[in-house]
Image (cartoon, helix red, strand yellow):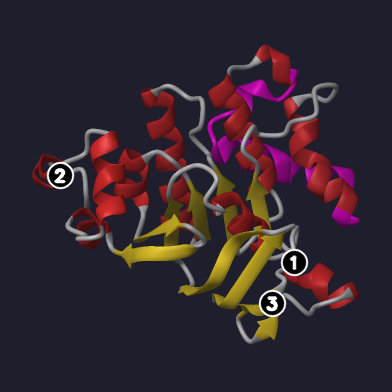
Amino acid sequence: MIRFDHIVKRFGRRTVLNDLSFEINKGEIFVIVGPSGTGKSVTLKHMARLLQPNSGTIWLDNESLSDAKGAQLEKMRERFGYLFQGGALLGWMTVAENVALPLLEKTELPKDEIARRVQEALEMVGLEDAVDKMPAEISGGMQKRAGLARAIVRKPEIVLYDEPTSGLDPVTSRTIDRLIQQLNHEVGVTSVVVTHDMQGALSIGHRLAMLYEGSFVEVGTPKEFMVSKVPIVQQFLAAQYIGKNFLQEGGVK
């Protein structure tokens, strides 16, 4: 569904993505992990065409996302929802108004239909009672859920998550994980998740990819990832106190 073919991205003299090639399947939860500064969010931004590669091609099905322009690019972007790292809610708008923004800006739907879709999205993330609240009046976890409602209100095929559990307590983090799984199971959304949270990554991901020095050094199922012989993978797992007992205790499906 999404394919990177030999993607190179440089910022000045620094190469962030170095000949990166991989494919994400339709209906998959694909999780990108790795140390800070390795290019995880940069990879995600290329999928939404917020960044352009220096070389290589990104494909969406059989169309080149890298080369798309004008109406073609707009149509391809409509297939994506994006949950930004901080939720990115506008502080002077209510939760409902924030969620309605993509519909107001990108569609000509009547007001009653927009209201219905906003309510539906908020119910899906458990925020139906926060319609009239301002972002400052709700918790960080609720802000993330409101951001997710905004990302899915146009019913995208693909949702991109940039550190969806960053800054959240463990209980709230697992709530966000369950929402990602719910969208995948009930609606068939293809999900691409960038995260440092290995517990969540191993619990929800169909496949995990470790990005290190601009390339994927490991790609596999959670069980394959856990037994990887790549040193940086094992170091990353050990740093979050995740060992073989995580497999035995049912933390990995």
115 in the magenta segment: yes
**Front-most of 50 and 152?**
50
Amino acid type indicated by mark 2 = Gly
Amino acid type indicated by mark 1 = Gln
On the image, the x and y values in percent for residue 61 come to: 60, 81
Distance, label 1 to label 2, CA atoms, is 40 Å
Q: Residue 76 — which label? A: none
One can see residue 170 in this view: yes
Element class at badge 3 = strand
On the image, the x and y values in percent for residue 99 come to: 74, 38
Compared across the picture, whether 110 is left or right of 146 comes to right
Residue corresponding to mark 1: 52
225 in the magenta segment: no
Element class at badge 1 = loop
Q: Look at the picture and state if 89 lies above or below 189.
A: above
**Which region is colored magenta?**
106-134
Mark closest to the chain's N terminus, 3 or 2: 3
Q: Residue 250 — which label? A: 2
On the image, the x and y values in percent for residue 29 come to: 43, 59
On the image, the x and y values in percent for residue 159 come to: 59, 55
Residue at 24% across, 49% down: 234
Residue corresponding to mark 3: 55
Mark closest to the chain's N terminus, 1 or 2: 1
Amino acid type indicated by mark 3 = Ser
